[in-house]
Amino acid sequence: MSNETTLAFQDQGAVAHCFGCGPDNQQGLQLKSFWNGDDAVATFIPKPHHCGGTPDITYGGLIAALIDCHTCNLAIAHLYKLEQRPIGSDPKINCLTAQLNVSLLNPTPIDRPIRLTARIRSVEGRKIWVDCDVSVADTITARGQVLAIKMRDNPAPS
């Protein structure tokens, strides 16, 4: 198996310090995203302090953060794939979330793993549109649509 399928995008140098997914942020959520064909998948296990209005439901803002990190990491990984080079290789590709739309469709139980499945909808220049489903067991609890923007290369200071 290649690193593409065995290492999370985040562990290949796609991000480092992000609260939601940065491997260097020990206080963060440590979300890990992996290829599944052309899609990306991630699993997050909420803790009791991630609760929303009641102790048995995951906080909606956490769901939005997970969608944000997962989709932006897929956008980065997809751009590396289009260039046929390893994630994290130089010159670095980075994306920022420009727009995040989240629909909370059903309460997300806190006592079971949350699965995120994201797919690229389209790419136009520096704009990457990504869709994401959030599910617990067989129930979709949220959907997200993200517009990620590829950051411009910054020339080295002289």
Image (cartoon, grey):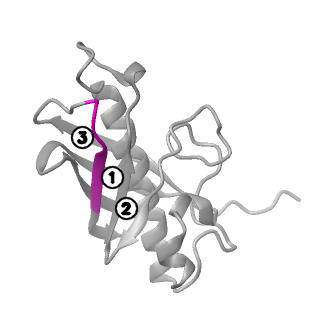
Q: Are marks 2 and 1 in contact (CB under 8 Å)?
A: yes
Which mark, by number, is residue 147?
1
Q: Say what secondary structure mark 2 lies in.
A: strand
Q: Dot 2 surroundings within 10 Å: few (below 14), some, or many (20 or more)? A: some
Q: Which residues are magenta?
A: 110-118
Residue at the outermost top position: 53
Hey, what amino acid is under mark 2? Lys
Q: Which mark is residue 21?
A: none
x, y percent for residue 40: 35, 65
Furthest-front residue in this view: 111
Residue 48: x %, y % from top left: 38, 22
Distance from the alpha carbon under mark 2 to that under mark 1: 7 Å
Label 1 close to label 3 by CB (< 8 Å): no
| Viewer-closest of 90 and 153 | 90
- Where residue 88 appears, x then y in whole percent? 63, 68
Q: Along the horizontal axis of the image, is 68 left or right of 131?
A: right
* Among the two numbered marks 3 and 2 on one chain, the one whose residue lies closer to the N terminus: 3
Q: Is residue 56 shown in magenta? A: no
* Lower sequence index among marks 2 and 1: 2
Instruction: Name the residue carrying label 3.
Output: 101
- Looking at the image, is 135 positioned above or below residue 85? above
Checking the image for residue 127, the label placed there is 2
- Residue at 80% x, 61% y is 156
Q: Secondary structure at mark 1?
A: strand
For marks 1 and 3, give the CA distance.
9 Å
Element under label 3? strand
Tell me the amino acid under the disc marked 3.
Answer: Asn
